Image (tube, rainbow, N blue to C red):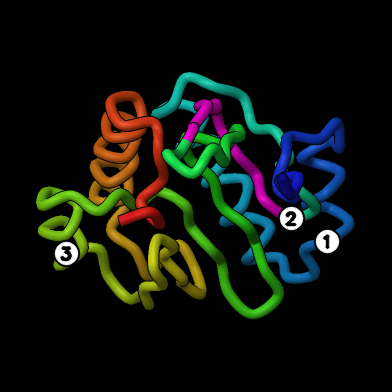
Amino acid sequence: MAKNKTTETEVNVFDFIESYVDNDQKKADSYRLIELMSEWSGFEPKMWGPTIIGFGSYHYKYASGHEGDAPLLGFSPRKTQFSLYIYSKTEKSDTLLTDLGKFKMGKACIYFKKLADLNISIVEKLSMETIAYLNENRECACRN
């Protein structure tokens, strides 16, 4: 069985931001997301893999036998845009997306340029919906 690439590491989140993020606005947005996601999740930020900042974790196991751990919430301040991992494929989440703001959607990832493009209260609601979904289902939205 293949080993998961995205696992929790010992890398310091703040050192990562200072060394990886080369844009002052993106740094400020990263620190704000850390503040918000820590509050919403009740967990301190941890690095997952080389570039994902995650909050909390859950263990999943699929019928195929594949299993692992993943963060409940997370984001990555990628070079061109942020990747936001706060989405679960639920009716409520899909409804919330209509008021989220300026973003693009991947299968289970929300891409945006700057935090000011998003409605923070909707980000919070999506985050809380995802935490509830993961606590109940123990699988990421990408499986749907």
Specify whether 131 is left or right of 97: right
Q: Give the Cα distance between marks 1 and 2.
A: 9 Å
Disc 3 secondary structure class: loop
Front label number (2 vs 3)? 2
Q: Position of residue 64 (x, y in %)?
A: 49, 44
Per the image, the residue denoted by label 3 is 99
Q: Give the Cα distance between marks 3 and 1.
A: 31 Å
Question: Callout 1, which amino acid?
Answer: Tyr
**Which image quadrant for residue 98?**
bottom left
Q: Label 2: how many residues lie within 10 Å, few (<14), some (14-19) or many (20+)?
A: some
Front label number (1 vs 2)? 2
Question: Are the residues flagged by discs 1 and 2 in contact, CB closer than 8 Å?
Answer: yes
**Which image quadrant for residue 103?**
bottom left
Q: Position of residue 46 (x, y in %)?
A: 70, 33
Q: How would you classify the magenta stretch by its main secondary structure?
A: strand
Identified at 40% across, 57% down, the residue is 142
Specify whether 44 is left or right of 140: right
Disc 2 secondary structure class: loop
Res 20 label = 1
Question: Callout 3, which amino acid?
Answer: Asp
The quarter of the image holding the C terminus is bottom left
Question: Callout 2, which amino acid?
Answer: Thr
Per the image, the residue denoted by label 2 is 51
- N-term-proximal mark, 1 vs 2: 1
The residue range painted magenta reads 51-61
Q: Label 3: how many residues lie within 10 Å, few (<14), some (14-19) or many (20+)?
A: few
Q: Position of residue 92 (x, y in %)?
A: 12, 48
Q: Position of residue 12 (x, y in %)?
A: 84, 35
**Which image quadrant for residue 129?**
top left
Identified at 47% across, 19% down, the residue is 42
User: Where is 116 relative to 73, above or below?
Assistant: below
